């Protein structure tokens, strides 16, 4: 999975709960998790590889990933736009599923996050998004969670929104966050982790309803059963 060479987040976003929503509280101290994990330095081994969370990660400029997605979407015809988006989201979904499992079973998680977990799997979900924030993928949090049914995530800064610097997008394009949000729900409620991905994966789907890249104040991602 990619670690965007953009920035690490050392502070938590201001929590915004949707009025009237069904929310699940968290025992996770987000600020403590973010402060602790954002200080960890990821470096390559003697083979030039970066093993972390049970997988190999890479660290490339955020612009590389944004330009890759942009070139792909520009090259396909309008009749294939949906299929191309699905491929980008699915790549993040599969990666998020396996990397997410690596995160919640890692030594870093056991040392920092696991002692805070009281409600399983809800606290694990909240903790996962704190890690997601700390490592610079997206400054994000859960604002609504109905166990097994629905999750709403808001992201206040994420590298896929950098394209707004060139003008507002006509459609949301945070494919990575969409895939990861669905993957985290798979891990929480989709059954036992399956390293082959044949079961447990794609039991949930995510739709992006708002995006900074579209001119909105934040990105919003709604996860429901597939």
Image (spheres, rainbow, N blue to C red):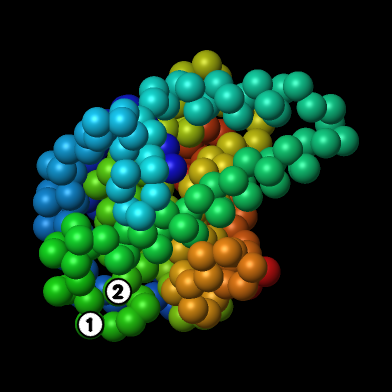
Q: How many marks?
A: 2
User: Residue 111's image quarter?
Assistant: bottom left
Please state the horizontal and vertical placement of residue 136, each as a whole percent of the image.
Answer: 31, 40
Element at label 1: loop
Taking the spot 77% from the left edge, 42% from the top edge, the residue there is 82
Q: Earlier in the sequence, mark 2 or mark 1?
A: 1
* SS of the residue under disc 2: helix
The foreground one among 98 and 39 is: 98
Q: Can residue 143 be seen here?
A: no
Relative to 81, is 158 on the left or the right? Answer: left
Residue found at the far bottom of this picture? 119
Outermost residue on the right side: it is 79
Residue identified by numbered label 2: 123
Q: Give the numbered dot on residue 144.
A: none
From the viewer's side, name the closer residue of 205 and 113.
113
> Where residue 13 sits in the image (x, y, percent)?
26, 49
């Amino acid at each position: 999975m990619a670690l965007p060479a953009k920035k690490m987040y050392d502070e938590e976003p201001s929590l915004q709960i949707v009025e009237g929503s069904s929310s699940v509280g968290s025992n996770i101290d987000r600020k403590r998790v973010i402060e602790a994990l954002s200080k960890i330095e990821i470096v390559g081994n003697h083979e030039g590889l970066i093993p972390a969370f049970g997988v190999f990660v890479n660290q490339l400029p955020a612009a590389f990933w944004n330009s890759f997605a942009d070139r792909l979407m520009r090259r396909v015809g309008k009749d294939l736009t949906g299929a191309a988006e699905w491929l980008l989201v699915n790549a993040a979904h599969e990666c998020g599923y396996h990397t997410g499992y690596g995160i919640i079973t890692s030594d870093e998680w056991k040392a920092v996050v696991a002692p805070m977990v009281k409600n399983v799997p809800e606290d694990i979900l909240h903790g996962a998004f704190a890690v997601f924030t700390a490592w610079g993928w997206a400054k994000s949090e859960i604002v609504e969670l109905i166990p097994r049914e629905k999750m709403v995530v808001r992201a206040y800064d994420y590298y896929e929104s950098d394209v707004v610097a060139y003008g507002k997008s006509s459609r949301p394009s945070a494919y990575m966050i969409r895939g990861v949000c669905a993957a985290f729900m798979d891990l929480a409620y989709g059954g036992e982790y399956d390293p082959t991905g044949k079961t447990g994966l794609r039991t949930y789907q995510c739709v992006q309803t708002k995006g900074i890249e579209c001119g909105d104040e934040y990105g919003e991602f709604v996860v429901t059963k597939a």
